[in-house]
Structures are given as structure tokens and as C-alpha cells.
Amino acid sequence: MQKYRRALITIPIILIVLVVLPFLIPMNAYVSQAEQAASGALGVPVKIGGLRVALLPTPRLNVSDVVVGSNEDFTVEDVAVVPAIFSMFSEVKTISSLKVKRPVIKQSALEIVSALGKADAAKSEPTSVTIREISISKAQLIWPDMALPEFNVDVVMTADNKPESAQIATTDGKVKIDLVPEDDRQRITISARNWTLPVGVPLLIDRLDSEMMLVDKRLDIQRLDIELYEGKVSTGAVLNWQKNWSLEGKLNVSGVQVAKPVSMVSQSTQLSGKLSGDGSYKASAKEPAKLMEQLQANFRFKVLDGVLDGVDLAKAATLLGTKGGMDGQTRFDTLTGMLNVAGKQ
């Protein structure tokens, strides 16, 4: 009985020691060394708010308030490095998991990532550290003219530190992306529900499902099906960045109510009816952000049972050369035409 009493007393003491001990280790002395090492590896200034060792729930190193780049291109609230204990005695050290909390990534961080990728490609010696899993919570991308939601990422890594599989999901649960390797390719599955498009016209997507294949520097969009405004849009395309960026594909639209989308594009134009049609598109540019500016498209369309507000076409046809017919409305059973797009025209 006395042994059990001692155990009951000893266990809480051990737990208290494990919790308190990390705060007694003077890790701040290593902050400047860590900053210098990280700056040398990334080629840009790195600031670290603090370092702390924790022993519970598992031994780990916490790195807090990380700022990368002179313009705060990449910031992280906290990084928890959880090592595999038994690997500490082997030549190759293993990190069981890398937990990243609240990273904020600006577009300018792509230059840092690109430079790091080229530097890693030039190295021939094997890495002395392997990572099994990477978990990212509440990440945020800061991109011009885009309102992107927070998202979580879970990545399982291979022995040579390459992604084996990955899952990405917005914190509101509206968008999910799965990446699964297939030989030398990556299959990408995307699903979205009740999601507002974050770039361009803020279209409300009721449902989106897509299958893609990433092969080297080419993305084959095998299937992209969208349900919105009581209709459907489907497309297949190929995005290539071997040299410059290029995009080529075909588009089909069926039964989309156009009143709401048209009002978002132009408040001065009011058109209702159901849109259907098909066509093709292509674009080529040195930067992905410039693709839309170089878009070339041909689209044959048909709008059924609609109303064009602001103009009376029948009246305008009888009053050619005058200003008559520039008000009122035109009801129609069928409106057909061809849309040609060349850049911004």
C-alpha cells in the first residue's frame, strides 16, 4: 500500500518537472545562431521571436514568431519540431512531425522558394534529416486582387523528403484538395461546395468537382465540372510551363441563368435568360498572372427566354439614325451570337 502511495506522489512530481524544466533551459542564447543559419540557407533575412523546448505531450522544439524576408514575405506564428527519439542516435535524424501554425505567405515569397529550389537541385549529397509528416494549420495566402480563405494542409513525406500524399482543405470546409502520387505523376482531386470564386467576378459555385494530373511541368485538367446559377459549366484544358506559361482548352455551358453574373460584370447591362454554348480558348504569357490578359477565345452562345433591359431593339430598328429605342426593354425567345476575345478586347 505504501508503494502505491509513493507512486501517486512521484508521478505528479515527474509531470511537474517535465512541464517546468523546458522553461529553465536558456534557449534564447541560441536564437541569433538559428537566425544566422536560417538566413544563410534561405539567402534572405530571418528573424525568430523565441525558441523553447517542451517535453509534453512529446519532446519537441518550438520556434515562435518567425519572419522571413526583408518585407515580411513569409511569417509563422509557431513551428513545433517533433523528433523521432530513437533516430537521435543514428546518422540520419528523423523528424516525426513538423507542425506549422498560422503561416502567412505573400506573393513575393515565391522568389525565395524558387531560389531555394534551384539551390537544392544543385546539391548532390543526401540529406541528413528526414521528415515524416508536415501539418500546417490556418495558413493564409496574401495575393493581389484575390480574397483567399484560410486553409489547413497535411502532407505525408517519403524517405527522400518528397511529398507522398497531401490533403488541403479550407478551414470553413468548402474546398478540399487531395494529391496522390501515381508512378511519376500526381493525381489531384478537387471538390468545392457553396464556394465564392476568389479571383475575377465573385461567382457563387454551388458545386465543383475536378480531376487533374500533374506531370513534370504540365497540368492536365482532365475534368472540371461546375454547377452554378441553375446551370452547368464543364471544361478540359492543359496548362504548361516548360518555357513560358501556356493554357489551352474547351468550354461548354448549359442552362446558366445569366441575370446575376451579368449584373456583377456590368451594372449598366441587364440581361436575363438561360445561357448555353461552347467554344475554345488559349493563352500564352511569361507569367501565370498575365495569362488572362493574353486570352484568345471563340464562344458560340444561345440565350433562351430572356429580357434585355435598357434598349428596345424593335423600336431602334424602325428609327435608324436617331436616338430612339435606347430605353425600354426587349423580350426574346432566342438570342444567338458569337463571342470573340483577344486579350482585353
Image (cartoon, helix red, strand yellow):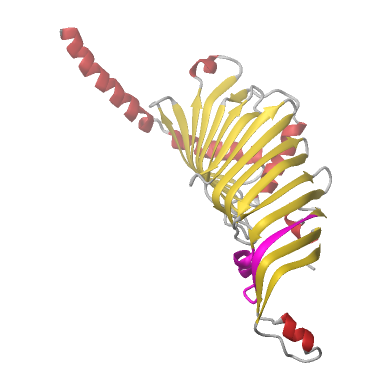
Front one among 250 and 108 = 250
Front one among 290 and 277 = 277
Front one among 302 and 48 = 302
Query: What residue is rendered at 76% in x and 40% in y?
Result: 220
| Residue 329 visible in image | yes
Compared across the picture, whether 108 is left or right of 148 comes to right
Which range of residues does the magenta coloring cover? 258-279
* Residue that sits furthest to the front in the current view: 333
Q: Position of residue 66 (x, y in %)?
A: 52, 44
Question: Looking at the picture, does residue 331 appear above or below residue 39?
Answer: below
Q: Position of residue 337 (x, y in %)?
A: 79, 66
Query: What residue is rendered at 69% in x and 81% in y?
Result: 311
* Residue that sits furthest to the right in the current view: 243
Q: Is residue 330 magenta?
A: no
Compared across the picture, whether 9 is left or right of 25 comes to left
Question: Looking at the picture, does residue 124 appear above or below residue 104?
Answer: above
Give the quarter of the image for residue 7: top left
Image quadrant occupied by the C terminus: bottom right
| Residue 342 visible in image | no
Disc count in the image?
0
Q: Position of residue 43 (x, y in %)?
A: 67, 43
Give the quarter of the image for residue 278: bottom right
Image quadrant occupied by the N terminus: top left
Question: Looking at the picture, does residue 188 appear above or below residue 110?
Answer: above
Q: Position of residue 13 (x, y in %)?
A: 26, 22
Query: What residue is rendered at 55% in x and 32% in y?
Result: 134
Q: Is residue 268 magenta?
A: yes
* Residue that sits furthest to the bottom in the current view: 322
